Amino acid sequence: MKRMETTLGGIPALVLGEDAPRAFLFVHGKQGSREDAQPFAEAVCAKGWQVLAIDLPEHGSRREEPTPLVPWTAAPEIARVMADARGRWAHVGLIAVSIGAYMSLRALWQTPPDCALFVSPILDMDRLITTMMGWAGVSQEELERRGEIPTAFGETLSAAYQRDVRSHPVERWDAPTAILYAGGDHLTPRGVVDAFAAAHGARATVMEEGEHWFHTPEQMAVLRTWLDAEMERLG
């Protein structure tokens, strides 16, 4: 598959696929990188699209940069990349995974992509933070008092992060959207996905025996089948 290194919105990017008038911006999840776009590109490039993939702060080629992965840095970056992409392609869609979906919703809800494909998306960050506070046995008062609290499961709870999420709600999402969700997703409850789908007219496909991170051969086969079906719908 053709690969080209470039820069969009001031962010190093990777473009996959032969030249085409349409492209998907790919935004990976936590611990991922732009290289995670490969299986998506194998499906969508065959349908006349390219894939534009970026590394979020603290990930992939940007692992050593001081910029942190927080909404107030990642969302403006995604918005700049999308604006630049719209100047290069006639149609631009979005493929986003896990926290990449939340960051993209934050970045693009006022200027949505032509279409969107979400895999295991974080759709309600405020609820997820509250859930993690419960896992760690941290009260709201303690979080406000201490500011940041490391947890045994590897996440650092942040009062500033929570305040930012609450002060920047995603007020709407108008892009035609399809979601692939795992029944065993421990970060986003099924009810959150159902509510998002109902509110925004999204299609949700559920792999009941799946988990938040789609990575096993069986899970990847389901992902590819889903991608193929969604690309057929897009035409």
Image: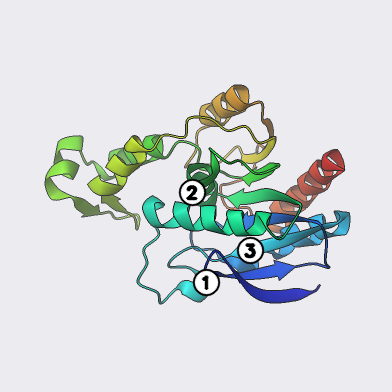
183 vs 56: above or below: above
Crowdedness near tag 1: few (<14), some (14–19) or many (≥20) residues, C-alpha within 10 Å: some
Q: Nearer the viewer, mark 1 or mark 2?
A: 2
Please name the residue that numbered disc 3 is placed on: 53
Please give the name of the residue rendered at 63% of the width and 46% of the height, measured from the top-left corner: 119
The Cα atoms of the two marked residues, 2 and 3, are separated by 14 Å
Quick check: can you spot residue 27? no
Q: Name the image quarter holding the C terminus.
A: top right
Residue 183 image position (x, y, % from top left):
60, 37
Look at label 2 and name its amino acid: Met
Q: Name the image quarter holding the N terminus.
A: bottom right
Secondary structure found at label 3: strand
Secondary structure found at label 1: helix
Please give the name of the residue rendered at 83% of the width and 61% of the height, measured from the top-left corner: 20
Splitting the image into 4 quarters, where does residue 155 fall? bottom left
Splitting the image into 4 quarters, where does residue 175 fall? top right
Q: Could you tell whether 106 is left or right of 93 in the image?
A: left
Please name the residue that numbered disc 2 is placed on: 103
In this rendered view, identify the residue nearer to me: 193 or 85. Answer: 85
Q: Nearer the viewer, mark 1 or mark 3?
A: 3
Q: Which mark is residue 60?
A: 1
Residue 170 image position (x, y, % from top left):
47, 34
Q: Are marks 1 and 3 in contact (CB under 8 Å)?
A: no
Quick check: can you spot residue 174? yes
Look at label 1 and name its amino acid: Gly
Look at label 3 and name its amino acid: Ala
The Cα atoms of the two marked residues, 1 and 3, are separated by 11 Å
Q: Could you tell whether 105 is left or right of 4 in the image?
A: left
